Image (cartoon, grey):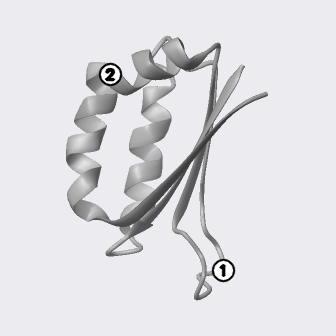
Amino acid sequence: MLVHVVLMKFSDAGDAAKARLRLEELADVVPAIRSMEVRTDELATEVSWHLHMRTTHHDAGDLLAYQSHPAHREFGVWVRPLLASRAVVDWTA
């Protein structure tokens, strides 16, 4: 199993809630997602990121299928202009 973690920091922290809703919709649309968890930050500290997403996939091929899925690409087009920063970590569990 491959675990894919993304942290997002938005130019406007209020956009994190909208992004969470849009990401959660992907779980029902993209077959290559085994599981998805999306959380938004509650403490808003100096070092906080606004959104955390964790998905699991059977393997790297499924992660690529998720990333190239039209619904994910549409989300990317929408979210990129809103982001101040993004970090990604992938590992095999």
Decide: is 65 above or below 79. above
Question: Secondary structure under badge 2?
Answer: helix
Marks 2, 1: nearer the viewer:
2
Q: Amino acid at mark 1?
A: Leu
Q: Gap in Å between the C-alphas at discs 2 and 1?
A: 33 Å
Q: Amino acid at mark 2?
A: Ser
Q: Nearer the viewer, residue 1 or 78?
A: 1
Q: Residue furthest bottom?
A: 46
Location of residue 18 by image quarter: bottom left
Q: Which residue does the image show at 64% across and 73% down from the upper left? A: 42
Decide: is 75 above or below 57. below
> Mark 2 — residue?
68
Q: Which residue does the image show at 51% across and 67% down from the upper left? A: 50
Q: Nearer the viewer, residue 47 or 37?
A: 47
Q: Which residue does the image show at 39% across and 66% down from the upper left? A: 85
Q: Residues within 10 Å of mark 1 (few under 14, many from 20)?
A: few
Left/right placement of residue 67 relative to residue 27 reads left
Q: Residues within 10 Å of mark 2 (few under 14, many from 20)?
A: few
Question: Secondary structure under badge 1?
Answer: loop
Decide: is 50 above or below 20. below
> Mark 1 — residue?
43
x and y, in percent, of residue 78 in the image: 22, 47
Location of residue 9 by image quarter: bottom left
Location of residue 41 by image quarter: bottom right
State the mark number for residue 60: none
Decide: is 3 above or below 52. above
x and y, in percent, of residue 6 in the image: 53, 49
Q: Which residue does the image show at 59% across and 82% down from the upper left? A: 44
